[in-house]
Image (spheres, rainbow, N blue to C red):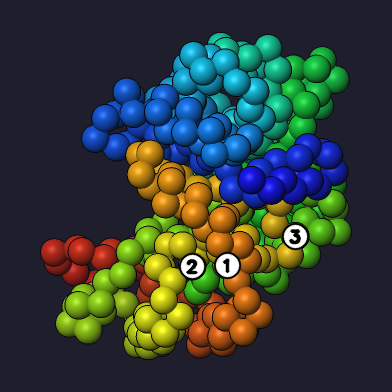
């Protein structure tokens, strides 16, 4: 598998790597994690990403890597392991990192990110919203000086707030999710340019947009999905027609599109089993998309350049009922 340089870290990472958010979500549960990790390494994926707040996945990844004994670049994130988490208690945050080291069977974490720094209503990391300083930034500097972590990063999901934090120049890597895919392109406006300006390594997660694009929903698109806006509905129909025309399965098209974007250091695939992992790996074998296909996908994306007002953050394909957008 080809390698790409992860920005100013200088690390050479596989262009498709393992996102470990779902490695225990398959039918095999915890027992299914090790086969996925082993196969990822066999496929020459050399980076795995997890988080303290992914439930048992950090532990499962660490256990698998320890059993397999093969080198791997590991990225994890500071986040709440349970209730009572205080993002401004530096001692507690340090214990959180120490727990990650223990679960991952590591003396050093290659990349430590702040999870969701761009959503203070979810996790209020910083003391102010201008300089983005706080106990967590002090801790990251200390851990880097002590050699406990090699590089720092941000793992976020917004299109503009995340770019403001990137602009501080404090971080080496950014992981962006849910805001950059075939049909959702807002990260192009601020996040990608800021990453290029700061020479930050750019990890692209959720190329299938949280499942919106993981499989096709032709029947529901025609006869249901009451939550779907008319512009988005027409956009999906145009995409499906194009998928039929070029003969590339939708999830593989998503991955090949992501791998074709200039500046993307690594695309994270989040398989629930070995079969999903192997299917996704074929996207790398097929290579980047031709220019004419990229141009047509740009045209389809431009049909809905911004998220429609009432569109839910997560898709509702397959929902039995729909009761409207809820309270304002």
- The percent position of residue 280, horizontal first and vertical second, equals 46, 52
Horizontal and vertical percent position of residue 313: 41, 62
Where residue 162 appears, as percent x and y from the top left, is: 67, 54
> Rounded to the nearest whole Å, what is the CA distance between mark 3 and mark 2?
18 Å
- Quadrant containing the C terminus in the rendered view: bottom left
| Residue count near mark 2 (Cα–Cα under 10 Å), binned few <14, some 14–19, many ≥20 | many
Indicate which disc residue 147 carries: none
Residue found 71% across the figure and 27% down from its top: 110
Task: Label 1: state its secondary structure.
Answer: helix
Quadrant of the drawing holding the N terminus: top right
Distance between the Cα atoms at labels 1 and 3? 13 Å
Residue 121 visible? The answer is: no
Q: Which residue is located at x 67 percent, y 66 percent?
A: 261
From where the camera sits, is residue 292 visible? yes
Circle nearer the N terminus (1, 3) = 1
Mark 1, residue position: 257
Image side of residue 294 versus residue 29, left or right: right
Residue in the image at 70% along x and 41% along y: 13
Residue 246 percent across, percent down from the top left: 45, 80
Q: Dot 2 corresponds to which residue?
A: 253
Give residue 263's mark.
3
Q: What element carries label 2?
A: helix
Classify mark 1: residues with Cα within 10 Å, few (<14), some (14-19) or many (20+).
Answer: many
Q: Do the residues labelled 1 and 3 touch (CB within 8 Å)?
A: no
Residue 26 in which image quadrant? top left
Which is more foreground, mark 1 or mark 3? 1
Taking depth in this image into account, of 229 and 11 the one nearest to the observer is: 11
Q: Earlier in the sequence, mark 3 or mark 2?
A: 2
Q: Is residue 72 above or below residue 319?
A: above
């Amino acid at each position: 598998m080809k390698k790409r340089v992860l920005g100013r870290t200088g690390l050479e990472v596989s262009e498709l790597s393992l996102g470990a958010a779902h490695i225990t979500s398959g039918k095999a549960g915890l027992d299914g994690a090790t086969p996925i990790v082993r196969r990822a390494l066999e496929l020459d994926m050399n980076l795995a990403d997890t988080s303290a707040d992914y439930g048992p996945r950090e532990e499962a990844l660490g256990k698998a890597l320890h059993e397999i004994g093969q080198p791997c670049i590991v990225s994890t994130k500071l986040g709440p392991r349970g209730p009572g988490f205080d993002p401004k208690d530096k001692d507690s945050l340090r214990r959180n990192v120490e727990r990650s080291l223990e679960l991952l069977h590591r003396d050093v974490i290659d990349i430590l990110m702040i999870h969701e720094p761009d959503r203070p209503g979810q996790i209020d990391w910083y003391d102010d919203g201008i300089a983005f300083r706080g106990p967590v930034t002090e801790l990251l500097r200390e851990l880097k000086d002590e050699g406990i972590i090699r590089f720092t990063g941000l793992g976020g999901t917004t299109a503009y707030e995340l770019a403001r934090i990137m602009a501080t120049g404090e971080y080496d890597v950014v992981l962006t999710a849910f805001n950059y895919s075939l049909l959702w392109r807002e990260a192009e406006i601020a996040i990608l340019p800021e990453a290029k300006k700061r020479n930050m390594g750019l990890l692209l997660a959720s190329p299938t947009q949280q499942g919106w694009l993981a499989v096709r929903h032709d029947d529901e698109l025609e006869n249901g999905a009451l939550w779907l806006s008319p512009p988005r509905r027409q956009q999906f129909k145009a995409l499906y027609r194009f998928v039929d025309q070029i003969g590339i399965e939708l999830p593989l098209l998503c991955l090949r599109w992501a791998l074709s974007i200039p500046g993307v250091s690594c695309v994270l695939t989040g398989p629930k089993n070995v079969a999903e992992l192997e299917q996704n790996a074929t996207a790398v074998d097929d290579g980047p998309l031709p220019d004419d296909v990229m141009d047509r996908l740009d045209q389809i994306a431009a049909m809905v350049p911004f998220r429609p007002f009432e569109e839910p953050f997560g898709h509702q394909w397959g929902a039995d009922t729909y009761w409207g957008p809820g309270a304002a």
